[in-house]
Amino acid sequence: MSSTACLATWCAETPDIWPEAARDAVRRAFVDTLATMLAGRQEECTVTARAAVSRWGSGPCFTAGGSRLTAPWAALVNGTAAHALDYDDVCEPALNHPSAALVPALLALAEEIGASMAACVDAYIIGYEVMSRLGQAMNQVHYQRGWHTTLSLGSPAVAAACARLLRLDARRTAMAISLATSMAGGSKRQFGTMAKPLHAGLAAKNGMVAAQLAAAGLEAIAEPLDGSWGYQEMMAGSTALGLEAALAGLGDDCAVLRHGIWAKYYPCCASTHRPVDALLSLQLAPGAVERMETLVSEIAVANLRYLLPSSVAEARFSLPYCLAAALHDGPLTPASFTPHAIARPEVLDLLARTDMLLDPAQPASRAIGDAVETGTVRVFLRDGTMREASAVTPHGHPRDPLSAAELAGKFRACAAAGALPGRATEQALELLAQFNSLESPIALMRTLEAV
């Protein structure tokens, strides 16, 4: 059986019998993603995308910050909003942002076809598995080549999830995945621009459209992943692990539990979180610091290329800024990423005395399974001493997850940033607490529309 047929058969035929822990992990992912969607709905990238697609007609689906649209355009706008602040969750094998693509697509499609939230949870688990297996097969080579995996791996994963929600058979699911590979792309050169969050919206829209086209009977190549000119050969090459090895054991467990879902504690690139945690663990006063240097992986160095950011978007991908801001602010919050915040003289002064260095023990050539990330910070104090700390497991990571109170707190803070009234916020949290028993997303989406 080919790789695509193997994946598609599993997606279509595996029973909807998941451990309760997996279902709760997905519920938490929906809470986190709806939070970041609310916080991002007034960002320029979201407003601009919403204005553009709104010209093409209205529909039945909730859209962050605006009137209702058809399902594909709602997915695009909501995916963009969810990723606008880079506050959304992470799938480590895929090196991407899974829920900003999966959740908007599944919610919009569920609104359109009348699917239940339990069906969305099931479809999310399927899509997350496809995303993580593709990541295992192709990373870190694929990521190192410059592909933004939220779009390049997100599109076929969302297609698989939407095919599951539509209850397509194995053949139609394979067609959905195949069609989605023709809609995938995305360069990391877009990091620090409005196009970066748009990539999540495109993945959500592309995957849904691919599944709908497959459901209508549109044909594509049966095996888009393997072989000459296949997805893996073109986008990762022969040095990556490969699909045959990555698909071994498919069905033994589920990636949602095997790898977990990393809910971010800070609204900035995930590559900054370990060194920021390491710095905060030292509990230093800003005035005591002469200079700082940080050692991070080759992947992190490539991602965090804005040493002196000129915009809020660039600041999210600037490790010197994030470290300097954390020293002054403590744990980074959305308030750390505003035009005023990034222009603070005291932060800019410290930023200029902060160096980012490549850790030679963490090359980008490592296979994804060997790529345990470490962030190390060395702080040289004015009294002539040096303090050093390293972090491997950032707060919010599956090995150190946000508590229920922290997740609810993040939702409330993001809802407030998105101008959702307090009463609607609490109603939304009540509905999300019973997420798996909701017959449809309609009541929840209406609550999020309150102004």
Image (cartoon, grey):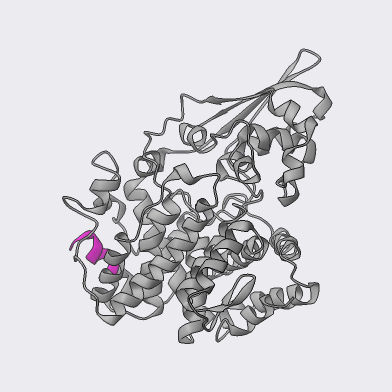
In the figure, is residue 152 to the left or right of 272?
Answer: left
Tell me if residue 38 can be seen.
yes
Q: Is residue 449 above or below residue 408?
A: below
Residue found 38% across the figure and 41% down from its top: 140
In the figure, is residue 408 to the left or right of 275?
Answer: right
Residue found 43% across the figure and 62% down from its top: 203
Instruction: Give coordinates of residue 299: x percent, y percent.
Output: 46, 36
Residue found 43% across the figure and 59% down from its top: 255
Counting every numbered tag in the picture gives 0
Instruction: Give coordinates of residue 45: x percent, y percent.
Output: 58, 57
Q: Quadrant of residue 28?
A: bottom right
Q: Quadrant of residue 429?
A: bottom right
Instruction: Give coordinates of residue 165: x percent, y percent.
Output: 41, 78
Q: Residue furthest front?
A: 55
Q: Dominant secondary structure of the magenta stretch?
A: helix
Residue found 41% across the figure and 38% down from its top: 370
In the figure, is residue 214 to the left or right of 357?
Answer: left
Quadrant (top left/top right/bottom left/bottom right) for the C terminus: bottom right
The segment highlighted magenta reads 1-9
Depth order, front residue of 442/251: 442
Quadrant (top left/top right/bottom left/bottom right) for the N terminus: bottom left
